[in-house]
Image: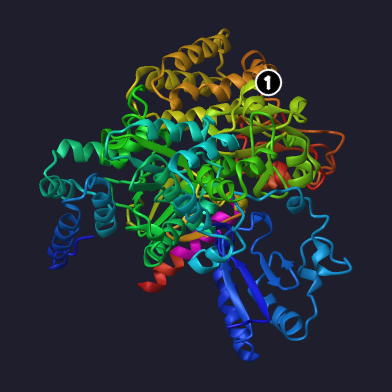
Amino acid sequence: MSCGCCCADNKTLELNKIIAKYKDTRGALIPVLHEAQELYGYLPMSVQKKIAEGLNVSLADVYGVVTFYTQFSINPKGKYKINVCLGTACYVKGAGEIFDKISEILKIKNGECTEDGIFSLDACRCVGACGLAPVIMINEDVYGRLTADDIPGIIKKYIDKESDAK
Amino acid sequence: MVYRSHVLICNGTGCTASKAPDIMTRLEKELAAKGIEKEVKIVKTGCFGLCEKGPILVIYPEGATYCHVKADDIEEIVSEHLVKGRIVKRLLLGDKDAEDVARSLDNVGFFNRQLRIALRNCGVINPENIEEYIAKDGYAALAKALTEMTPGGVIDEIKKSGLRGRGGGGFPTGLKWQFAAQEVNGVKYVCCNADEGDPGAFMDRSILEGDPHSLIEAMAIAGYAIGSNQGFIYVRAEYPIAVQRLNIAIKQAKEYGLLGNNIFGTDFSFDLEIRLGAGAFVCGEETALMTSIEGKRGEPRTRPPFPAVKGLWEKPTILNNVETYANIPVILLKGADWFKTIGTEKSKGTKVFAIGGKINNTGLVEIPMGTTLREVIYDIGGGIPKGKKFKAAQTGGPSGGCIPSSHIDVPIDYDNLLELGSMMGSGGLIVMDEDNCMVDIAKFFLEFTVDESCGKCPPCRIGTKRMYEILDRITNGKGEEGDIEKLEILADSIKHGALCGLGQTAPNPVLSTLKYFREEYEAHVKEKRCPAGVCKAMLNYRIIPDKCKGCGLCARKCPVGAISGEIKKPYVIDKTKCIKCGVCMDTCKFVAIEKK
């Protein structure tokens, strides 16, 4: 989220620090990508280029790793990241309908972000809370034992939070 | 400091999501308000296993187990139980009228059928305090190994115990260690697979969150046995609580001299590093996991050479999963002869299962090998909700298969599951009832494999995709004559042609559902009918004239105006307009609408 002021440069400084920290570690690329994504929210090409230069690996290697693992994203994510668990336990308890409901309300598909940048939607594999199936996570908050009817209320809570903030 | 009462609160992922942290805060406040905060100790523990009844809170010395606790119940628990010594019976798990609290759990099948070895400390100790682990014989096995046993002696003991890998194929652990120990070439590595990928299995997470020191101790023992000084734990990034507790545990072990140089004053040194996974199922395959630790795309390599000869950075490496390691300290302390008495002839010890899906008590259970599926589902799991009929249980995740009701009395062990066309896998056990469509479940798993295939070998990359396409058209009512046979041919080529375990086992969900539920596939293909009523494209909603009272509610609720009729006479659904949303069925008070 660049605001056009000095933070962009601050982030570059942070990124350089991350690269320096891991430079001499074997297998450094994945830990560096994790921390860089933490910093930027996603991994745009400019960041991937800096990492390639900093760790002295080819950009193709960096891009190859980024696109291989589902944790890494080359697209920006929403302020509220909605993850719908589609693990087996959640699936047999109707997680598919919950996913469809969210997709219908927000008018976005898997992996997409709403135009205003507020919500993004992803299907994920098992968050390990199978006892609460079906489960969704919005950022760090876990909602369990859901039905499709619970979804509008949950999303409204975040929309209200946003309009209050304005 | 001595406390008169201990309050144990589950801080596993399930209970944390059901607001256990709020309960903690409230408890601290209430204890302070009553002035007894110095008499009662609050202990944050790992998972008790019964996630369905969470949040769970246990008070000792009475052993009162309270379930579904809410923050508003805390005041009553404090003033009644902790101040006046009266049990709050309404929140008690199990028999509320038992003579004493300890007996209230006697008849709770969920607990009394279990034998906890790998989960021995989960829900019992505070995972963030090494002293609690040490008080439960923690690190005694490492001390014994280093001071009383030779590396060969450790391997012999593990071999003798009959312990097999708990993460997938069930390879004998001692043998794996022996292969790596035989290599004389300098540097070796000990790795732990904590990248629990099977959707629906969470036993490794529970051990990492509830008893991280048992893993650290076991990996150090493994290091001593094979002659390695460096270990790596490859853990899922999706498990933030586990990563945090593991970091705390490693730091504490280093402070106590249980990791690092010259452990217990011997010349053995061992260190551990954590590496985060990044969401790739294939990284559960051993060679792919090692490639990923090396910082590359997690693609598998051909074997041989096996990792015990050439593994991480081409050095001899052993890899076991979390649950396998968690058994090691107990085996060394109690002896292989004791461990061997548990389980069946070829599968020794216990296995942890994550039971989920259509079952009353979802959660984690550890049972002796050889327990039957019936005991797991009905005695421990409390049966199927809403009195529905058991249809099948799925084990082994995307690599496994289904066990139908006709085999419900088979004792669960490695070999029996393989014979039934499934596998142990990491221990996910998903229960399905009559409302689940087996073709849909097979499609679900194939979609998973297509998504997770790394793309290195064509049988897996292209073959699973083709299988998925066939399943997709079958479930959409467009199945063609010969589709089932095509699935079988593809499955066979993929099984024999794929490079790694992920591809070789990918067709299993299809093959096992075909074996036991072929008529369901045929109904989809030939009659364009989904017997379980799941596959939307083939569903038709119909009003049963005898049951319809003609109230008109469904017609008002129908979003597309497909229902018409006269008040007090049976209504009808116009199939050409119906979008199969199911609103009518949900609104009808007389159960007069069926889908077929």
Placement of B167 over or under B242, stated as above or below: above
Q: Nearer the viewer, residue B90 or B409?
A: B409
Is residue B499 toward the left or the right of residue B330 in the image? left
The location of residue B572, given as percent across then percent down, is 75, 33
Placement of A146 over or under B544, stated as above or below: below
How many circles with numbers are drawn on the protein? 1
Disc 1 residue type (three-letter): Phe
Image quarter (top left, top right, bottom left or bottom right) of the N terminus of chain A? bottom left
Q: Is residue B184 magenta?
A: no
Is residue B172 toward the left or the right of residue B36 in the image? left
- Subunit of mark 1? B
Q: Is residue A153 magenta?
A: yes
Q: Quadrant of residue B501?
A: top left
The location of residue A81, given as percent across then percent down, is 40, 55
- Majority SS type along the magenta span: helix
- Is residue B361 visible to the viewer in this orientation of the structure? yes
The residue positioned 64% from the left and 81% from the top of the image is B3
Q: Nearer the viewer, residue B380 or A37?
A: B380
The location of residue B357, given as percent across then percent down, is 65, 42
Q: Which residues are magenta?
A: A147-158
The residue positioned 12% from the left and 50% from the top of the image is A54
Name the secondary structure under disc 1: helix
Q: Which residue is mark 1?
A: B517
Is residue B171 toward the left or the right of residue A28 in the image? right
Placement of B304 over or under B338, stated as above or below: above
Image quarter (top left, top right, bottom left or bottom right) of the C terminus of chain A? bottom left
Q: Nearer the viewer, residue B426 or A96?
A: B426
Q: Residues within 10 Å of mark 1 (few under 14, many from 20)?
A: some
The location of residue B559, given as percent across then percent down, is 61, 44
